[in-house]
Amino acid sequence: MVKIKDVRSSNASIAAKPPGMVALFIGATSGSGMGTLRQLAKYAQAPKVYVVGRSQSSATHLLNELKELNPIGTFVFLETEISLIRNVDKICSEIASKEKKVDLIVMSTGYLTFAGRQDTDEGIDTLAALSYYIRIRTIYNLLPLLNASISPRVISILAGGKEGAIDLTNLELLKKHSPVAPYAVPATQMLFAFEELAKTNPSISFAHVYPGVVNTGQLYRFMQTATGLWALPAWLAQWTIVPVLYLFSQTPDGIGEMMLFIATSARYPPAEVKGEGFMVAMPKGVQVAKSSDERGGKGNGVYRLDHHGESAPDTPVLAGYREQNAGKTIWESTEGVWRRALKKAT
C-alpha cells in the first residue's frame, strides 16, 4: 500500500508539471468528487476545469474556494440535469467546441436510496443512469479529445473491486428490480465497458475506484428513505451502525488526496503509453498497479481499485465473463439504452 506521505509528495509534484491541464468533473459538488477537485486545484498549474452540476448558485461557494486555491486556474461551471443522456451530449458538444484535448475525466454522480425504480424521462433507472449510463456516454463522446491528450485518464468513483455476478439478460433492470441491483449491476457494467473501450483506445488509462465510507452524511439520508419492512432496520442502523462507520470514515479531502494520486500517478499506466504528460513518476519502491486483465505480461490499462489505490484481485466470475465475451454484450446493451433514450427525447 502506498504511504500517505508518498501520496502527498506525488500530488505536490503536480505543481512542477506544465500548465494547461484540461479536466472534466461530473458529480464534484459534494463528497469524494469535490475532495478530488479541491486537491487538483491546490496543486495543478493553471488548469482549466469544467464542473458539471445541477445548480450553479449552489456551487458558488465551491467555485469561489477553487479560485482561492488556484487564482490562475479557470473553473467553468456547466449547469444541467446530468441524469439525461441528451444533456450529456450537449455538455460534451460544448466542451468539444472549446477544447482541443481533455486530459482527465473524474465522475462520481449518484446517491443512495431505498426507494424503488424511479425512471428518468428518457426511460432509464435514475440510479443506473447516474452510476453508469451517463458516465460511459461522457467518455464515449469525448474519446477524440481524450486521445488528443498525451496522458489521458478516466476515473469513475463507484465500486471498483466490488464487481460480481449479474444477470446479463436483465442489464436494464426491467425484469427484476431489488434494492441492491441499481448499485451492483452498474459496477460490473462499468468494468467491462472500460475493458471494451480500452481495446480500441489503448492510450487512455481507466480506473474504477471504490472510495470507501466518506463522511458526507449520505448514509444518514439513505436510512431516512427506508419505508415498509426496511423502516425499522434502517432506523436502528441510523443510530447504531452508521455512527460507527463514520468513526472510521474519510473526509472528502482525505479521499480526494488518494483520488488525485490515482488520477495523476504513473502507477496506473494505459496499455500503450504515449508520453509523460501530466503524469507524475511513481514514488520510490512503489510498483505499477495490476490491471484488470493481464495477458502475455501486458496490462490492459484498466484498474479496479480500492480506497487505498490498490488493485483488487481478479475473480473466477469476472474471468468467466471475459471467456463469454460479456463485454460485447454489455456494450451492445448500453448502446441500445442510449438510442432509446435519445429517441424518447425527440
Image: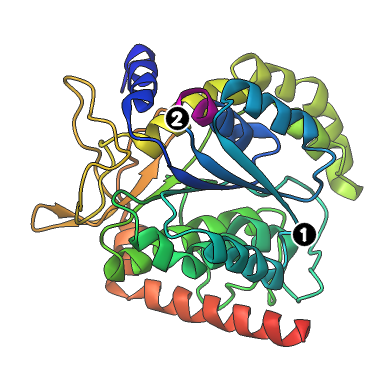
Specify start and end residues of the magenta stretch as a single range.
39-45
Report whether residue 260 is seen: yes
Position of residue 234 relative to residue 68, above or below, is: below
Q: Quadrant of the N terminus?
A: top left
Tell me residue 304's x, y (percent). 38, 46
**Which numbered disc covers residue 44?**
2
From the viewer's side, name the closer residue of 216 and 18.
18
The amino acid type of the residue labelled 2 equals Ala
Position of residue 31 relative to residue 48, above or below, is: above
Does the magenta portion include 43? yes
Report whether residue 307 is seen: no
Q: Quadrant of the C terminus?
A: bottom right
From the viewer's side, name the closer residue of 160 and 257.
257
> What sort of colour scheme is used for the picture?
rainbow
Q: Left of 124 or right of it: where is 197?
A: left
**Which numbered disc covers residue 103?**
none
Does the magenta portion include 218? no
In terms of secondary structure, what is the magenta stretch mainly?
helix
Tell me residue 11's x, y (percent). 39, 24
Q: CA distance from mark 2 to mark 1?
A: 28 Å
Q: Residues within 10 Å of mark 1 (few under 14, many from 20)?
A: some
Tell me residue 102's x, y (percent). 44, 54
Secondary element under disc 1, as helix, strand or loop, is loop
Q: Quadrant of residue 2?
A: top left
Secondary element under disc 2, as helix, strand or loop, is loop
Q: Counting residues from the N terminus, which is met first, the one under dot 2 or under dot 1?
A: 2
* Residue at 43 percent of width and 60 percent of height: 100
Q: Quadrant of residue 84?
A: bottom right
Tell me residue 218's x, y (percent). 75, 34
* Residue at 76 percent of width and 76 percent of height: 122
